[in-house]
Amino acid sequence: MSIKVIPLEPIPNQRLSFRINESNFDIEINLRRDNLYISAWRDNVNQVHNRVLRSYAPMGDGFMMVDTEGTQDPTYDQLGTRFLLMKEDG
């Protein structure tokens, strides 16, 4: 098993797709009321639904947000640099 970094942009609202092993993933991140929310689908089945993004809090299906400089919760302007979305590929 290994960990993959999911490439995010430093923008408040985004949707992206990627493939790990034989599964297709779709991620949606939205800014609402000063919090970032994430939803994730694996092969069109919802795995994470409107969860507030918190650093180091497991979100389900092997996703986790990591603060590379400490333990703050993510802000959109540092997504993909300071705040990395990671996924176990196993």
Image: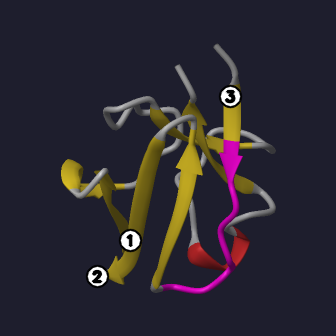
Q: Do the residues labelled 2 and 3 touch (CB within 8 Å)?
A: no
Helix, strand or loop under label 1: strand
Which secondary structure type mostly characterizes the magenta part of the structure? loop
CA gap between label 2 and label 3 equals: 30 Å
Query: Which residue type does callout 3 highlight?
Result: Ile
Question: What is the span of residues highlighted in magenta in the rendered image?
Answer: 5-12
Q: Let me know if residue 42 appears in the view.
A: yes
In which image quadrant can residue 5 be found? top right
> If you read the primary sequence from the N terminus, does the residue marked by circle 3 or circle 1 appear first?
3
> Which residue is denoted by mark 3 in the rendering?
3
Considering every residue shown, the one lying at the far top of the view is: 1
Residue 33 badge: 2
Which of the pair 2/35 is nearer the observer? 2
> Which residue is denoted by mark 1 in the rendering?
28
Residue 74 lies in the magenta-colored region: no
Quick check: 40 above or below 22?
below
Task: Assign the N terminus to one quadrant of the image.
Answer: top right
Query: Which residue type does callout 2 highlight?
Result: Arg
Within 10 angstroms of label 1, few (less than 14), some, or many (20 or more) residues? some
